[in-house]
Amino acid sequence: MGKNNRVLVLDDDKQLLEVYCEVLNPKEIKSSALKAFAGDDIDESQENKKQFFDVVTVDQGELGVEAVRQSIEENKPYAMAFVDIRMPPGIDGLEAARRMRDIDDRIYIVIVTAYSDRSIDEINDSLVHDVVFTRKPLTKDEIFQLARNACMSWEKDEELRSMRNIMEQRLEENQIVREYFENLVSSLTEGLLVCTASGMITSINPACAKISEYKEENLLGMSLDTLFPDGGVGDLIQKIIREGPQEHSADLLTNSGNHAAVILSGSVIHNKKNSMINKKEQSVVLVVRSAN
């Protein structure tokens, strides 16, 4: 979605609706209402340099709610809305804003009123977030600044939402890959274990647990020296880290005290995100196969 400069205005005063349009999307002819509402200091040359907004105006609360509903259906959401409190004979501005928020929680609301029908606390409790309360009359600069700030905030929010969605998607994809890898490793007939450079086991598959006659949970955190008390495996791990993949014959001591001749094939697990990782922090994967 491109830049969102869509502004919705709810006010039962048709002259003021014209004012909003002329301030936010200036025309060549300036009305008397604009001068009365915004002062006489209108500089035509400055107006032409201003940012233009896509402005939609309605004079009843129900029409504002319908406009927001339609904007969502068309995937053209409003970034913000100016909402008057009193708009007889229909629902008031606060109720309209509440219903608009139910449809689109992203929209910024600016409550504009000349009366004190609703307290600030009531407005904040109803709309919860991203709401500004202000009183009439507003200057043209205030109208413009409120619209610009709200649209900019909407853009920043959308950027964060997009980044969050991308991260959630990547996490989901990584989880799928991780589950696939775990299922693949678990289905291997050959034993497989992952250990740190110091020889502590951090991961293991069922086949390796079966060879060692230990439960998988008991092997996690165990030192390789427990499985290979005759030594040599620690040196093998360091050689793998220094020189790359290696193969080594070893004697594995099972949980029942039996000895099993095995062949160990090992390689370093490379961290693509950090190629400068300390060798002491590297992990090694070992494939454990029966030598018989």
Image (cartoon, rainbow, N blue to C red):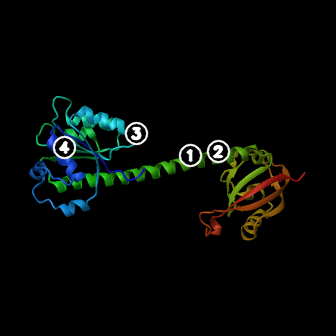
Q: Which residue is mark 1?
A: 172
Report how far apart the C-alphas of labels 2 and 3 lie in the structure: 38 Å
Residue contact at pointers 1 and 3, CB within 8 angstroms: no
Q: Residues within 10 Å of mark 1 (few under 14, many from 20)?
A: few
Labels 2, 1: front one: 1
Q: Which residue is mark 2?
A: 179
Residue 161, position in %: x, y? Answer: 42, 49
Residue contact at pointers 2 and 3, CB within 8 angstroms: no
Residue 106, position in %: x, y? Answer: 35, 44
Q: Residues within 10 Å of mark 2 (few under 14, many from 20)?
A: few
Can you say whether 89 is above or below 218 in the image? Answer: above
Mark 1 or mark 3: which comes first in sequence?
3
Labels 2, 3: front one: 3
Q: Which residue is mark 4?
A: 17
Report how far apart the C-alphas of labels 4 and 2 lie in the structure: 57 Å
The type of residue carrying mark 1 is Glu
